Image (cartoon, rainbow, N blue to C red):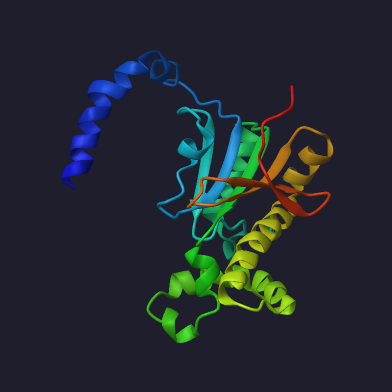
């Protein structure tokens, strides 16, 4: 913990003062332009990989960068309210115009779903949460990957595609998207290279983010 306390002091003495005007402007309200949904993995740092400042991103993090499918209001008690409430707040209250669902390489959630249920008996909350990845698991198994590494790679990317589909099941998301008021992206972050692949929802494939031609 010592390094965290020292880091907090360094932030107050150096980094905060270097951007004091920015923090002062954020005192009363926030106006983020993008909802960033990512995994809780400590190796994925949203502001770092997007080179954004405080106030730019409204970040939602959970195990496996999962977007629970939409449920009617009468079934709210059966839903996963934390992630759903954050999405609702981002679009309806903050009127955010962009959403990025960001998965990543070497994702533990995308690996453990193939393990024996007995391995999850001591983590019942994780077991229940990861049941949301059952459709992803079935899609990957149907493709019959020839190795574990290929299976994980397919799972990580198909998971992003599936979460985008879940996101579009929310009426208030679909309505804004159809009116052209909302842009939605799927990213796949490769930890060991720093490369980010962007999912094309028309061609249904991931391609590296590249500089725009001028």
The quarter of the picture where residue 138 lies is bottom right
| Viewer can see residue 54 | yes
The quarter of the picture where residue 99 lies is top right
The quarter of the picture where residue 81 lies is bottom right
| Viewer can see residue 72 | no
As drawn, which residue projects farthest toward the top?
21
20 sits to left or right of 62: left
In the image, residue 128 above or below residue 45:
below
In the image, residue 26 above or below residue 191:
above
- Residue at image coords 40%, 74%: 123
Which one is nearer the viewer's eye here, 38 or 153? 153
- Residue at image coords 42%, 82%: 119
In the image, residue 134 above or below residue 196:
below
Picture quarter with the C terminus: top right
Q: How many labels, in total?
A: 0
Which one is nearer the viewer's eye here, 181 or 116? 116
185 sits to left or right of 124: right
- Residue at image coords 25%, 25%: 12
67 sits to left or right of 192: right
As drawn, which residue projects farthest toward the left?
2
Which one is nearer the viewer's eye here, 39 or 179? 39
Residue 29 coordinates in the image, percent (x, y): 49, 23
Residue 206 coordinates in the image, percent (x, y): 71, 51
Residue 51 coordinates in the image, percent (x, y): 50, 31
Residue 56 coordinates in the image, percent (x, y): 53, 29
- Residue at image coords 72%, 73%: 139
In the image, residue 114 above or below residue 97:
below
């Amino acid at each position: 913990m010592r390094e965290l306390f020292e880091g907090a002091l360094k932030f107050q003495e150096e980094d905060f003062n270097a951007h004091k005007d920015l923090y002062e402007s954020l005192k009363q309200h926030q106006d983020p332009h993008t909802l960033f949904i990512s995994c809780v993995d400590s190796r994925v740092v949203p502001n770092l990989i997007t080179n954004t400042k405080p106030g730019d991103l409204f970040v939602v993090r959970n195990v496996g960068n999962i977007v629970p499918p939409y449920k009617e209001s009468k079934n709210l008690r059966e839903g996963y309210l934390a992630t759903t409430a954050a999405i609702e707040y981002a679009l309806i209250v903050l009127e955010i115009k962009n959403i990025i669902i960001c998965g990543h390489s070497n994702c533990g959630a995308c690996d453990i779903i193939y393990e024996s249920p007995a391995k999850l008996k001591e983590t019942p909350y994780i077991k229940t949460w990861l049941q949301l990845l059952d459709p992803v698991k079935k899609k990957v198994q149907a493709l019959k990957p020839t190795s574990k590494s290929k299976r994980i790679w397919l799972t990580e990317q198909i998971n992003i595609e599936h979460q985008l589909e879940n996101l579009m099941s929310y009426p208030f998301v679909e309505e804004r998207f159809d009116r052209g008021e909302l842009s939605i992206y799927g990213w796949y972050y490769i930890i060991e290279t720093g490369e980010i692949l962007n999912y094309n929802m028309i061609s249904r494939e991931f391609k590296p983010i590249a500089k725009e031609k001028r």
